[in-house]
Image: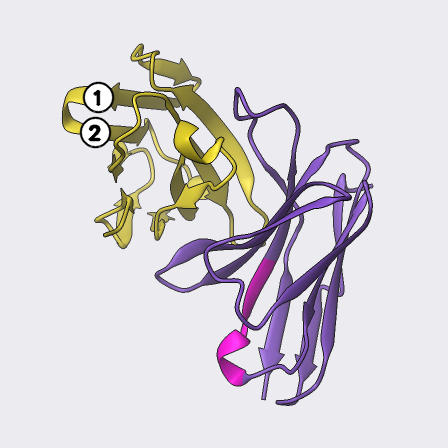
C-alpha cells in the first residue's frame, strides 16, 4: 500500500463546480503539503500544514482552501473551479522539525481537468 | 526571479552515454538544503538526494553522482552510462533556513530521454 494516497487519481469537471482532492498518509508525518504541477513551471506550493492546528499559505493559494482533518488527512478544495486550475496536483508529507529539512514524500498525483 | 534554474528543458542521449543535468540556485541564506527528484513517465515523484549547504562533498550512488559547488551556486546531477529507465523529468529543489525549510522551491524540471 502507498504511504501517501491521493484520491481521486483523475477528475474531469466543469467550470464553477466545487472539487475536493483528498490525501491520506500512513507515514506518521506531521507535515503535509499540496502542490500543483504545470508544464515548464515545476511544482508550486499551494498550502502546507505542520499539524492539525497549523495551516499556512504557499506560493499560489488564491482559489484554493484546505482542511487538515487529522494528522493523517489533508484535503484540498477548489470552491469554484476555473479552467486555469487544470493541472497535476500532488500531496506530500515530511518528517522532522524546523531545524533540518527532511525530504518530502509524494503521493502519485491527481490529474484534474476543468472544462 | 527564479530561485532554481534548470536551463535544460529537454535532453536526449543515446543509451550508455553520460549526461549531466544542470541546476543553478539563488539564495541569500547561508543555511539551506538542495534536493533532486525524479518523475518517471508514470508520474510519481521519487526523492533522489538531499544535500545541506555545509556539505560540499560530491556524492556518488551507483550510476548517479552529484557535484555541489557553492562558488557557482550549482548542484549538478550526472548519470553515467545512461539507461532507458533513466528517462524521466528531473527536478532540482531548494529549501532555505529563513522559511524554516518549509517552502521547498522547485525548478522547472529537465526532461531526459534516453534512446535505446
In the rendered structure, does residue B55 fall within the stretch colored magenta? no
Neighbor class of circle 1 (other Cα within 10 Å; few <14, some 14-19, many 20+) is: some
Q: Is residue A73 left or right of residue B37?
A: right
The image shows residue B43, relative to residue A113, as above or below, that is above
Residue B35 lies, with reference to residue A14, above or below; the image says above
Mark 2 to mark 1 CA distance (whole Å): 5 Å
- Range of the magenta residues? A83-89
Name the secondary structure under disc 1: helix
> Which residue corresponds to the image point at 61% horizontal and 68% vertical from the top-left?
A64
Q: Is residue B34 visible?
A: no
Name the residue located 46 percent from the left edge and 26 percent from the top edge.
B49
Using residue A108 as the reference point, say whether residue A103 is left or right of it: left
Element type at mark 2: loop
Quarter of image, res A93? top right
Q: Count the marks: how many? A: 2
Where is residue B52 shown, x and y percent of the image? Answer: 40, 19
Q: Which tint was used for chain B?
A: yellow
Is label 2 in contact with label 1 (beta carbons under 8 Å)?
yes
Q: Which chain is purple?
A: A
* Residue A9 in picture, x, y percent from top left: 71, 64
Q: Which residue is labeled 1 in the image? A: B70
- Residue located beneath label 2 in the image: B73
Amino acid at each position: 500500500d502507498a504511504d501517501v494516497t491521493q484520491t481521486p487519481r483523475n477528475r474531469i469537471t466543469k467550470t464553477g463546480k466545487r472539487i475536493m482532492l483528498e490525501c491520506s498518509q500512513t507515514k506518521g508525518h506531521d507535515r503535509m503539503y499540496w502542490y500543483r504541477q504545470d508544464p515548464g513551471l515545476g511544482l508550486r506550493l499551494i498550502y502546507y500544514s505542520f499539524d492539525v492546528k497549523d495551516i499556512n499559505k504557499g506560493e499560489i493559494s488564491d482559489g484554493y482552501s484546505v482542511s487538515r482533518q487529522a494528522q493523517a488527512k489533508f484535503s484540498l478544495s477548489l470552491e469554484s473551479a476555473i479552467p486555469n486550475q487544470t493541472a497535476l496536483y500532488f500531496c506530500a508529507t515530511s518528517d522532522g522539525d524546523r531545524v533540518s529539512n527532511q525530504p518530502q514524500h509524494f503521493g502519485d498525483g491527481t490529474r484534474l481537468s476543468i472544462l | 526571479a527564479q530561485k532554481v534554474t534548470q536551463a535544460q528543458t529537454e535532453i536526449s542521449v543515446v543509451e550508455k552515454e553520460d549526461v549531466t543535468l544542470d541546476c543553478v540556485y539563488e539564495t541569500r541564506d547561508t543555511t539551506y538544503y538542495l534536493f533532486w527528484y525524479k518523475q518517471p513517465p508514470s508520474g510519481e515523484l521519487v526523492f533522489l538526494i538531499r544535500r545541506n549547504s555545509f556539505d560540499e562533498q560530491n556524492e556518488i550512488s551507483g550510476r548517479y553522482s552529484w557535484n555541489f559547488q557553492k562558488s557557482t551556486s550549482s548542484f549538478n546531477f550526472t548519470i553515467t552510462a545512461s539507461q532507458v529507465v533513466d528517462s524521466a523529468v528531473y527536478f532540482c529543489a531548494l529549501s532555505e533556513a529563513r522559511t524554516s525549510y518549509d517552502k521547498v522551491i522547485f525548478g522547472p524540471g529537465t526532461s531526459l530521454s534516453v534512446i535505446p
